Each structure stands twice: as C-alpha cells, then as structure tokens.
Image (cartoon, grey):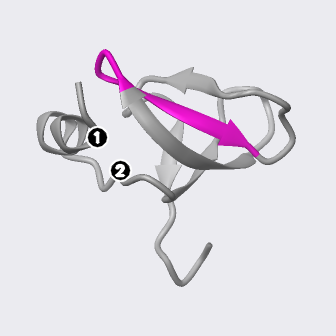
Amino acid sequence: MSIEWVRKYYRVPAKRGGRVEYTGAGKPELGTIWGASGGHLSVHLDTATHLMTFHPTWKLRYLGEALS
C-alpha cells in the first residue's frame, strides 16, 4: 500500500520526506518518512542506523514543514 493510501485511509498528513516525532520509546525521537508498506510507514529515526516500521496513528506526531 502506498503513502497516498495511508494518508487517505488513516487521515494523516504522511508524505515521503515528511518529518515525524515518535514518542513510543519513552522519549521523543525525530525521524523522516521514507515510504510505506502494508499500511505502515517506513521511518528513519535520526538516532537509528536502519529504517523502522510504524503504524501511522500510533505514537507518531506529524510535524509541519515550518517545524522540520
């Protein structure tokens, strides 16, 4: 499933290159959306060495372009 599908189905502003804040690990971490697969987002957290998969509505805050 594409990012467009994720955006429409979950009603989130997900887009390739968009910035997010993940809060599920006990402290906020910033990351960049790289793509989508199977209804989930592939995100590269700034502190990680690999892509991670996240549900589009779980512990993610989508940041506006002015904040990224």
The residue positioned 27% from the left and 48% from the top of the image is 12
Amino acid at the residue labelled 2: Ala
Name which residue type carries label 1: Ile
Whether residue 14 appears in magenta in the rendering, the answer is no
Residue 46 placement, left or right of 66:
right
Of helix, strand and loop, which one carries label 2? loop
Disc 2 and disc 1 in contact, CB within 8 angstroms: yes
Image quarter in which the C terminus is found: bottom right
Element at label 1: helix
Range drawn in magenta: 37-45
Measuring 58% from the left and 37% from the top, which residue is drawn there?
A: 43
Label 1 neighbourhood size at 10 Å, few (<14), some (14-19), many (20+)? many
Q: What is the number of the mark on residue 3?
A: 1
Give coordinates of residue 13: x percent, y percent.
30, 56
Residue 10 placed where, x, y %?
20, 36
Find disc 2 in the rendering and name its residue.
14
Pick the front one: 35 or 61: 35
Pointer 2 local density, CA inside 10 Å: few below 14, some 14–19, many at least 20:
many
- For image coordinates 80% across by 39% down, the residue present is 27
